[in-house]
Amino acid sequence: MKLGDVRQRSAVSLAVIIVATIVALLIAPTTRNGVAIAIALDVAVACLATLTFPGLRSSHPVVARAALSLLGVVAVLFVAFFLPSASDFNLATGAAMSIVLLGLSFLTGASGQISLGNSAFMGVGAFTMAIWANHHATTPIFVTLLISVVAGALVGLLLGLPATRLRGPYLAGMTLAFAVAFTAILGEFSSWTGGDSGLQLPTEAKPPHWLISLFHSGTSPLTTSTLWLTDISIVVAGVAFFFMANLFASRTGRAMRLIRDNDVAAELVGISLPRARVIAFVVSSAYAALGGALWTLIDNSVSPPTYSFALSVTILSLIVIGGIGTISGALIGGVIYAYSTNVISWIVNQTGLNPQGNFASQLNGIIFGGLLILTMLFAPLGIAGAVRHFWHRARNRS
Amino acid sequence: MDAFLTSRIIADVLGGLTNGVIYGMVALSLVLIWRSTGVLNFAQGAMPMFATYVGFALLSYHFGYWLCAVAALIVGLAVGGLTERLVVRGLYGKPEINPIVVMVGFLIVLEAVAAAIWSSFPRSLPSPFSSIDWQLGGHPVSLSPFTVYEIGAAIVVMLAVAALFRFTNLGLQLRASALAPEVSRLLGVRVGRLLTLGWMLSTAVGVVTTILVSSNFFTGLTPQVNDGIFAFGFIAAAVGGLESPVGAIVAGVSLGIILQFVQDYLNSNAQIIVALVVLIVALMVRPNGVFTKSSLRRV
Amino acid sequence: MVKSTTRRVTISGTALLLCLGLVTAGSSIVSAGAAVKKTPGVTAKQITIGATEPETGIAASGYNQVAKAADAVFKYVNARGGIYGRKIKYVIKDDCYGTPGFGCTGVPNTATQTHSLLGLPVFATVGSLGTPTQDTVRALLKGDDVPQLFVASGSQDWNNPHQYPGLFGWQPSYNEESKIFAKYIKATFPSANVCFLGQGDDFGTDGLAGLIAGGVTPSDEQLYSVGALVTSNGASIAPYIQRFETDKCTIVVLDSIPGATDAALGAALQLGYSPQWVISSVGSDPQTVDAPFVGKVPTDPEQGAITFSYLPTTTTSSPWIPWIYKVIKADPADFPGFTSSSVLNGNIAYGAAYGVAFVEALKATGKNLTRAAFLHTLQTTVFSQTPSLVPLSYTNSNHQGLNGGYLTTVISDSATKPITGTVYTTDSSSTGPVTVAKKLSSGIPAWLK
């Protein structure tokens, strides 16, 4: 790589950033939702330009990942702005789910442990959020989210410690038992958890004033809490993905993958197996708790039957279909979760089935379960894995 | 001890025994499949449920209870065999998570298809024996003709399977095929056939369980009838050790009795919590199950 | 080459983003003044309403017929030209009673389904079912100014006009029903040993409070959890009945859904225990409750149980009964194979009754249909020609709904019969007395016949 080329390309990138900022400032006063859109565009362009800095990926991978995450977040926020409220709601739910999938992808794919207990960890986060908000209504949202994450991590530690000695089916069995017992535990403490009815958040989440003032006209679209909550979910998801990407690439991540592939070799190299397993467990439960807390925020309420074992199965299915052990798999799984009902209603409409009939109401399960079986039999690395496979084959051919 | 307390204890033991033999059978089916094919069958509840639905669909053609039960058993054998051949065959030798996920998917599909065809409305199966408890001195004794039938049928099935495994040539071949398939093949054992047989047997045991559970008075047959039982059966199998049929039965029965006392003296919710605690304690002491002999493997 | 590809991608990407921005800016300016104020869900030809119902799952048995019966009423009215030329479109979404599980794999929760209804948009939600499910969407519907009408539940959560002006219940509250039960128990079984089993939410706690307020304090009070009921296939109810048998209770009051009623009746049968059952209208419909026992025991275990009804029973001569039969038979899509000899069970009667209430309210509002006008009509009109025994009326300080009914006994696996036929009325306070209702409903309005 010639030095002249590097300087030329850096100059071009910098110039692009400056031009974009000027254009954004020009657009801002004339649009209805001016400043916010201008900022969004500017950030997006800056990220793109940053990514093209030569050698960034190899010399400053963290910065590259940050730029990519930020770009993704801004793009999705932009799209969410123009979607109808129902779609935004689905998007928010899907974003929260993708965080949970990320945790499980790490645990199972990167460290080879099977956990069926993620629904319970989601529930821990969800209920922590609700219980805390009901007792301390003035805590800022992000602080409450953090508290829920810590709660999830603690419970993950509690369960992860005995789990380190267990192999395959026994670990699956213990996490299964935990997931099934979780709803019963919630029932035992019904004075805290609201029993069968669950809990509601005391106030609806509203965006802060300084954010609303970034929009010009009187009826700011951000005053609908759905969009605000969607934005929170997307931003939190972006942060979660950023951390996970770094974790995957770090020494800890590499150690985990070694354990998954060959635990004897890992021990020989000096990696402490129990410690690594517990770390993986704690990380996955923290992520699951974050997803659950977001769900409570989005729904403005929490109810025990949501966090049953069947949810764990859904989570496992989604990450398997998306691609276990990958980050993009978690994204794909989240998208599937967000929009699967829409797709299925569309299918029901097209085929002329009676929407209230037996068959239509079970179509979700049939398609879901069928996809799971087919994916595991023919494409065990999921959609992400299959895409990667075809990409490599195409590359090798040319 | 006064009479009331004694009768309460006896009632709990009998009630617990009734549930325990069911858990024991579920645990036994899981162990059967694990020992013969190394797969953890999450659809262990759903496959027999489906077979029972098919078998008892004959009720509308005025077939009697026993004929329908036999039909359900035959369908169960077929379902088990077909599942092994078509679905599970491709999974041997793959990472552990693959068969688990496939069986979970199978569970979802079976429950959804059953609900699509027959709806989730509980179906009442006729009981061949009365479910009304016998009374002793004005107090019900937690034992009725039906529970005697239930316990009896379960014990017969469990003993038969255990005997098959331990004492017959077929059982020997089953265990050999699982442990050392190549060597067994060289010795003339039809390994493939035996793997299929393992699944068929396990599903048949599951059908017996399902019929007993759904002939119960007020619950009836629904697509989810085996879900709760599966969780307890799984815990029993893990506590007893997935390698040990005897362990499965003992753990299942003990768990049933313990949980009945828990339900009586605490409440229903506490049952699964206690089961979880039992599991954690058991696995911390013996991570491969209480009855597993970790050193020697006998063929 | 890789380098130039990256540059090309960057430049084209940037250009694309800039174009997007300009287009957005342009369209924002153009569309700024375009919004017209119209009532959502109402056009010249159609009114769209929605509801979330348990179409699948534990609560579905029986309850999935409720909204379909209302739909049959709407179809009947549509076939006769609709209301002021507008046909009613009723969009029903499945929320699995808010208890997602294997029986409802992938079924979205109530919040998601409600959001999708709001996106249609709907004029109001009518008859959505469930206490916890509807509690979770109260704030959402209020925030979008969507009326939440005739919630299918007897909780007092729907009677909160100050905080939720668009939220209305319909059936008598659990509290009111229990007070009327208490009056009857005190008069007929003055020295009985009474035990109570209720659901572990509003249903049980409000019901118990009403019993006590009416003067009957149970010697043993228990609450069951719906979650445990589902996972144990009903076995979780047996210990409570065992306790009652040990306590030697002669009267057992049940505030339970049909699945729990079944479990209680079955447990008692097994123990050879036969108290006088007093069962809430929510879980006493004979056809639903007796289904698991048919063919297994000589007599229906619910026979002789006392229950409460705010709609005319099929054994009386109310003109609404043949009318409902007519309407249901005319809707084979929702009720395939329904004939004059089919059973008109409590679920169907319930749905038909609130369906009639809704169309009458629409008619009374007039041709100019806005949400404000509709809510005003609802709170200032007394509807005395609906299927319910007492007239339906709301005020701007009371959104509960019906407040009276009579006591009935179960006489077979498909019907109940009034005990005396006297209709009682009361309120949900702990001190309001139970009195004989002076004004009763008076027949079918001419335009509906």
Image (cartoon, coloured by chain):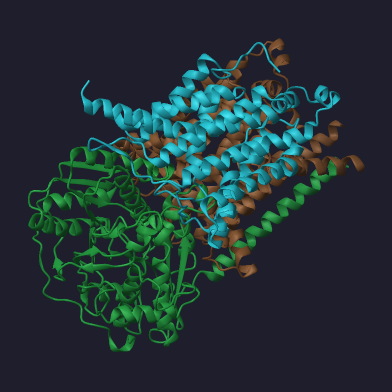
Please identify the quarter of the rendering in which residue C200 is found.
Answer: top left
Q: How many marks?
A: 0
Please identify the quarter of the rendering in which residue B276 is found.
Answer: top left
Q: Can residue A132 be seen in this snapshot?
A: no
Tell me which residue sits at (46%, 78%) in the image.
C331
Please identify the quarter of the rendering in which residue A190 is found.
Answer: top left
Left or right, C244 with reference to C7: left
Colour used to depict chain B in the structure image: cyan
Tell me which residue sits at (14%, 67%) in the image.
C424
Q: Which chain is brown?
A: A
Q: Residue furthest right?
A: A398
**Which residue occupies the foreground of this view, B47 or A383?**
B47
Residue B250 spot, x, y in % from top left? 50, 23
**Which residue occupies the foreground of this view, C147 or A144?**
C147
Tell me which residue sits at (11%, 50%) in the image.
C216
Colour used to depict chain C in the structure image: green
Residue C35 spot, x, y in % from top left? 47, 72
Left or right, A384 with reference to C326: right
Q: Can residue A44 be seen in this snapshot?
A: yes
**Which residue occupies the foreground of this view, C12 or C321?**
C321
Quarter holding the C terminus of chain B?
Answer: top right
Residue A332 spot, x, y in % from top left? 65, 46
Quarter holding the N terminus of chain B?
Answer: top left
